[in-house]
Image: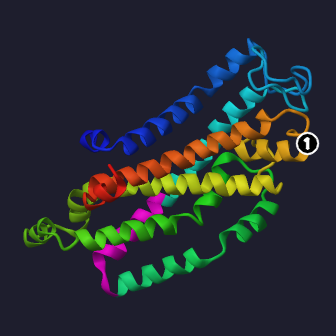
Amino acid sequence: MVRAVTGSWKLAAGLITILVLVLVALLSPLIVGLIGKGDDPIAIAAYERWLVPSPAHWLGTDQYGRDVFAMVIGALSTSLQIGAIAGIISTVVGVIVAFIAGYKGGPVDGVLSTFTDMVLVIPSFPLLIALSAYAKNIGIVEVGLILAIFSWPFAARTIRAQVLSLRSRPYVELARVTKARDLEIIVYELLPNMLPYIGVGFASSALGAIFALVGLEVIGLGPGETIDLGKIIFTAIGTGAMTLGAWPLFVAPIFLLTLLFAALNLINIGLEEVYNPRLRGVAGA
């Protein structure tokens, strides 16, 4: 993996960006505490309303007198937590389905692939809207679970295609000749070679869940008790923050979402360049 990272600047840049954002999210309680200097900077009426950016408040304050920078840092942590929960659940389900379908083949592959395609073509956003209407006051874990229901087919299809390619490799055939069990072949022969694709599947599912939640929040149908990046954007739109000069309330969360999207695309391109050398000349690596 170290060789892969050093072999592609795009992969390195994407991973560094993701790691920095995750580190900021992990340190968010400490950062928020330092901003508040012992007080809660995101409490209602903690400061004056609509303060402009200044050394005391880097991104100003919102309509309730909350520090926007502290809100954005906390919202990043919440969004990444929800994305991680949805990504883990969807990746685990997708890996199980993909390995069973791709390795077994035949009727098993046909049934599982058909079921995956059926879930894949279901319009997920209207269903998410319907579910969110009846689940306004739910926690982070429940939100991640709901989002994972519709994101596992993407990981399953990507991983299944690779399993179909790997199952006919000589080392897999050798393992079958030595009477290795199917589970042993999957765990010891196939899984290690699939880790980069599983990682990309996890990142894609997590980012998809984050953007799906942002979409729900922007139209006012997100969970009521959580403050994530989408909720801040919804607040900025609803209060007309841009016209009031409070542009950081709108720009800051969009900037973080753009960073996440760009980092994932860099990782995808970098992995393609590393594991598919034919693309290096095309991609200009």
The quarter holding residue 241 reads top right
Q: Residue at x 34, y 52 (%)?
A: 284
Pointer 1 local density, CA inside 10 Å: few below 14, some 14–19, many at least 20: few
**Image quarter (top left, top right, bottom left or bottom right) of the N terminus:** top left
Where is residue 123? Give x, y as percent: 66, 74
Q: Residue at x 85, y 39 (%)?
A: 242
Secondary structure at numbered mark 1: helix
Q: Viewed as shown, does residue 285 lie left or right of 114?
A: left
Q: Is residue 188 above or below residue 45?
A: below
Q: Residue at x 39, y 44 (%)?
A: 10
Does the rendering let one see residue 141? yes
Where is residue 201? Give x, y as percent: 44, 58
The quarter holding residue 283 reads bottom left
- Say what amino acid the circle numbered 1 marks: Thr
Magenta-highlighted residues: 91-106
- Residue 92 counted in the magenta span: yes
Where is residue 259? Give x, y as percent: 57, 42
